[in-house]
Amino acid sequence: MSLPTSVPVSWFLVLAALLFAIGIAGALTRRNGIGIFLSIELMLNAVNVALVGYSRLLGERTGQIMVLFVMAVAAAEAAVGLGLFIAVYRQRRTIDVNRLNLMRW
Amino acid sequence: MQFDLLATAAKMALMLGIFILGVAPIMLWVERRMSAFMQDRPGPNRLGPLGLVQGVADAVKFMFKEDVTPAGADKPLYLMAPALALIPALSTYVVIPFGPDLTVSGKTVPLIVSTGSAGVLIFLALSSLGVYSLITAGYASNNKFSLLGGIRASAQLISYELALTVAVLAALIPAGSFYLPDVVAYQQKHLWMVIPQAIGFLVFLVAMFAETNRLPFDLPEAESELIAGFHTEYGAMRFATFFMGEYISMTALSMLAVTLYFGGWTLPFVHLTGWLGAIVGLAVLLGKVSLFMLFYVWVRWTFPRFRYDQLMRLGWKVLLPLAILNLLLVAVATLAGWFPGVG
Amino acid sequence: METAIFLLFAALALGSALMVVTHKSPVYATMSLVVTLFSLAVMFVLLGAPFIGALQVLVYAGAIVVLFLFVLMLLNISKEEHQHEGQTVHRWVALLGAGAFVGLVVPLIYRATQLRNAGVLTEEFVSIRGFARDLFTRYLLQFEIVGLLLLVAVVAATVVARKPPPAPSGVPGADSPVSPSLEIEP
């Protein structure tokens, strides 16, 4: 199998930056709690791409191992976060973050 | 470059041709005749000799049936779900080796479509995408029973995926590679993996049934429980697509089982090469896979169905610990040097 | 050839990411996330990390997003309502912030990557053996900690999401406001 070498790494990094920006815009804009969560996952994936890109650039495997850990942390965060959503939904019957404002001053 | 592309295209055409055009009609016939035989009744025997044309008649019937879409159904998702059932199942063939390396006009052509080093992982990754068809079918049908069936089915699938993956991991340890031709080469040189890893094979077998929603694990699509579970609202060609997807994923998992535990395309004391070896290898692989498929049908018409909580308990509390125990044993055995040929 | 694959899947990733962020129905947003994750898996393979790519599909797209879908369907989350007051300003501010981020980072990227060229991809770099060797020797402590983290997450998720224990009878007003129809079990 031919090993890929012809796409410059900076392209991947720009892709990561764009995805991260899209994720930020989504996390700040969405009202649905799950929608915010999805945008956060998007940001995490953008970071993953950047990590693997730099790992390729520097010839070190550290970036890839960090990606493994990021994935594990994302899984843990998704599990606990969705558990929280279920608990909140039970009490308040909504996931709309504009209406979940009990802690606002 | 051209040669590589041509070779890959030829291999893909061969695999897809055999397994798509071959599997569904043959399995339909086998299923109905064998279940009839086990239940002491004739089965389809009117159309063609031994009822062989029945599959064609069924296909024609499916094509002419009225295509009903339920009111209030989420149209794009509803239409996408059958395709989502087929695509992951069809793409898993790329990592199964079906013969020794061929030498064509001076170049070596390995008889496997994808030569990536992460072979088994690709298989597992693609088959784990099959969950989406169940969820979208259940959700998009606008039907409480379908939704429930879809959720149960996906929960079942992801639970048994764990035990399956751990069992597969253990089977790979002596060969030391994720690339399936290496595993086959190890088994050809030493011994079939099913002998030292019987526990692992048992776990894999049970998980295989659960992953394909076949009895005794077919509660999600049980005909007497939730109407027809997640595919209640699907008729005609869409139902046929789900059916085909199920048979194809059964074949795919059987091929993985054969390659990991029973030596793949090799026979114990036979070492053929070249075109003859390729043809014999393919025939051997198909033969072993057919034995597995017969076993599938046999089990289906023998056992009663598991209840949902029994099913989940089995997956998490019995199979997963067994698979981990098997992994531990294999790891210890490898370190102690009991596996032949491992450094 | 690789350039064509990169462009195709990068466009797919960006397009589906935009869908994730803008689509009103959360189920469609989640399915678009699956497409994004799959395209990023292809990116990982192009960058010489096929193991990470396979893991991305196996773990992220095959399990985490399925979990999202479970919760969405069990709770029957409806589509987001249309914009209300203050929403438009909100959106423009978010877009401005995202644009500023991209504008700041991209020149940095070009500056950083011009000083050094990516080396040739060796078979050893791509191999899973090398990855495993690094993971289990150099990064063993981190690996064990992540395992512990996952255990904690399992326990936490189970505790947080379970049904609240029934209030003792006879205490006035202690009933949970949750109706029986909200018993969430498949």
Image: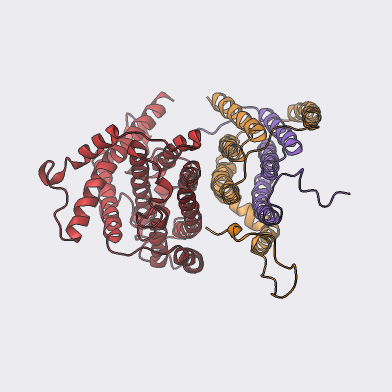
Chain colours: A purple, B red, C orange
- Residue C9: percent from left, percent from top: 57, 29
Seen in the picture, residue C17 relative to B124 is either above or below; the reply is above
Residue B273 appears in the figure: no
Extreme residue toward the right, this view: A105
Residue B70 appears in the figure: yes
Left or right, A94 with respect to B166, comes to right
Q: Nearer the viewer, residue C50 or C126?
A: C50
- Residue B22: percent from left, percent from top: 26, 40
Seen in the picture, residue B197 relative to B293 is either above or below; the reply is below
Left or right, B36 with respect to A94, comes to left
- The quarter of the rendered structure image containing the N terminus of chain B is top left
- Residue B113: percent from left, percent from top: 40, 37
- Residue C130: percent from left, percent from top: 59, 49
Image point (69%, 37%), residue name? A50
Q: How many marks?
A: 0
Q: Nearer the viewer, residue A69 or B65?
A: B65
Left or right, B305 with respect to C32, comes to left
